[in-house]
Amino acid sequence: VHLVESGGGLVQAGESLRLSCAASGRISVINSMGWYHQAPGKQRELVADITSGGRTNYADSVQGRFTISRDSAKNTVYLQMNSLKPEDTAVYYCAAEIRSPAIQLYTNYWGQGTQVTVSS
């Protein structure tokens, strides 16, 4: 199983970016999917997640600015980031709880990360 992120980059404050993360490989079921970020010298933190039923959860710092969504048919999760701030600068990681045919337990998988840089 692999998670591949795309969509990061350098933007100015107030602009928008859309991140995508596609899961591939031998997948039976994907439970929750989410986005985390990690700024230099800080711990990795949850940005937003979404359950298989579509229930969403956001960090207070992004509530009202970011929107998480998923396309279950494509095994893909998105993060629409609007009104970006310099403090949003971080590496953004995709995560997913996936059950594969070989392992009848949910396992957490991570993407390689994509850099988001917001200049003031």
Image: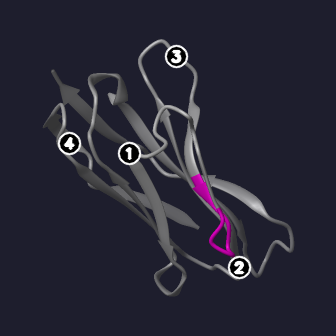
Give the residue pinned by disc 3. 42
Mark 1 neighbour density, 10 Å: few (under 14) some (14–19) many (20 or more):
few
The Cα–Cα distance between marks 3 and 4, rounded to whole angstroms, is 20 Å
Residue at 15%, 37% in the rendered image: 11
The earlier-in-sequence mark between 3 and 4 is: 4
**Does the stretch in magenta take in 30?**
no
The earlier-in-sequence mark between 2 and 4 is: 4
Give the residue pinned by disc 2. 29
Extent of the magenta region:
49-55
Secondary structure found at label 4: strand
The Cα–Cα distance between marks 1 and 2, rounded to whole angstroms, is 29 Å
Secondary structure found at label 3: loop
The Cα–Cα distance between marks 1 and 3, rounded to whole angstroms, is 22 Å
**Does the stretch in magenta take in 50?**
yes
Residue at 80%, 65% in the rendered image: 106
Give the residue pinned by disc 4. 9
Q: Position of residue 73 (x, y in %)?
A: 51, 87
Dot 3 amino acid type: Lys
Q: Magenta part mainly helix, strand or loop?
A: loop
